[in-house]
Amino acid sequence: MMEGLLRFKMDVEISQNMEDLEYYFNENGELRHMLTKKPFVYSYYKKEHERNHKRYKMLGKLITLHVYELLEKECNLERIPIPIDAKEEEPKSFFFMSKEGLGVPTSLLVLLQDKGVIRAGQWGQKVIFHHSLEKGTQIPYIKTALREYGSLIVLNPNDNFVEMKEEPHLIIKKEEELSMSVPCDGSDLLRTSRKLLIPKRCCSSPEEHTSYVWDHFISTSAAKNVAFIAHGYGGLVFLDLLCKKRKEVMSKVCAVAFIDSRHHSQHQARTDPEIQTWMHTNCRSWVLSNKPLDRPTGSLMKFDCPKVSAGTENHELAPYKSLSSIFRFLTRSSKTRRLSNFPSQTIVTRRTKRN
């Protein structure tokens, strides 16, 4: 039994890359088994739920590292550690930014994803598992933004804690005490291994992470037009930022695209009609619907932004499905903002000629 337990620990905890778990991404960015070439299967081990779940979590962590690598090598983004005044031994978070920096007065796009295990560069990990990198990551958005929009920031709002394991001698002692007191089949030994979660300073929550990046990078950038794309819980995080830093955000941000957002403007900004008016003018929400992409949907209330169909009823596929519609909206919004910044000019018409 102990030999089987050690084999299980090696399978789950010592894997350094996806090849150790016999998976890889093919030329289409689809996750495939190295031997069978078949798509990912959760129940890899029959009637061993805990082992399958551990394997799934480990593969998810390896996918996260793979996406980080793609952001740096394929998208040419730079990893920015935060907080900026962190000591060398202090736990740090990070986000990604285009290498051109924020000193160029171009447009700046900020990507803000849903909550959960997903990290920078991902919209939905299940989509990566069962569909492809193209549909589950932010890479199509990043490439489009760098080509057409200007500078880019990819937030990492769910990287909030560092895991610290208990000292090995303490775990061994607990295992010995447990084995002497009750008979076990190995599963009890696993439960003795506890993890201590240490919050990362200035990044202990999605709201805190986003606020920190806003204060130290976005608000001080030279960008004239800043736009946000917020998916799921990311919408709630943006509205939290808007409510806390109303004047700063409203003067700097020209457009926000919400994708199946969890924000609730009626509750979060119910006492501020100025915010409600700003959202109605500068934001648009892509909601889950069986209607074709971009079709108006739902009732339009004065305290919320216009709603259109995301072209799907799948929450995690919504960003991929609505990409083209969202960038059309952002392009129109940035053009409108640029025109409004120019001094008013007299437009020559037939009437002015007659006068």
Image: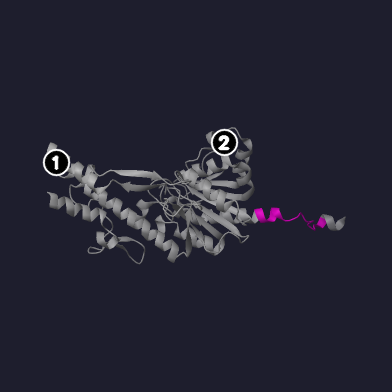
Residue 339 colored in magenta in the image: yes
Q: Amino acid at mark 1?
A: Ser
Q: Residue at x 57, y 36 (%)?
A: 269
- Residue position marked by numbered label 2 in the rendering: 269
Mark 2: give few (<14), some (14-19) or many (20+) Cα within 10 Å.
some
Examine the rendering and report whether any part of residue 131 can be seen: no
Which residue is nearer to you in this view: 273 or 336? 273
Examine the rendering and report whether any part of residue 276 can be seen: yes
Task: Kindly indicate the quadrant of the structure image that contains residue 336.
Answer: bottom right
Which x, y percent locates residue 147?
54, 64
User: Marks 2 and 1: in contact by CB < 8 Å?
Assistant: no
Q: Secondary structure at mark 1?
A: helix
Which quadrant is home to the C terminus?
bottom right
Extent of the magenta region: 337-350
- Residue position marked by numbered label 1 in the rendering: 179
Furthest toward the top, the residue is 271
Q: Residue at x 61, y 42 (%)?
A: 246
Which x, y percent locates residue 224?
64, 55
Q: Amino acid at mark 2?
A: Ala
Which residue is nearer to you in this view: 289 or 257? 257
**For this view, does 182 lie left or right of residue 244?**
left
Which residue is nearer to you in this view: 164 or 173? 173
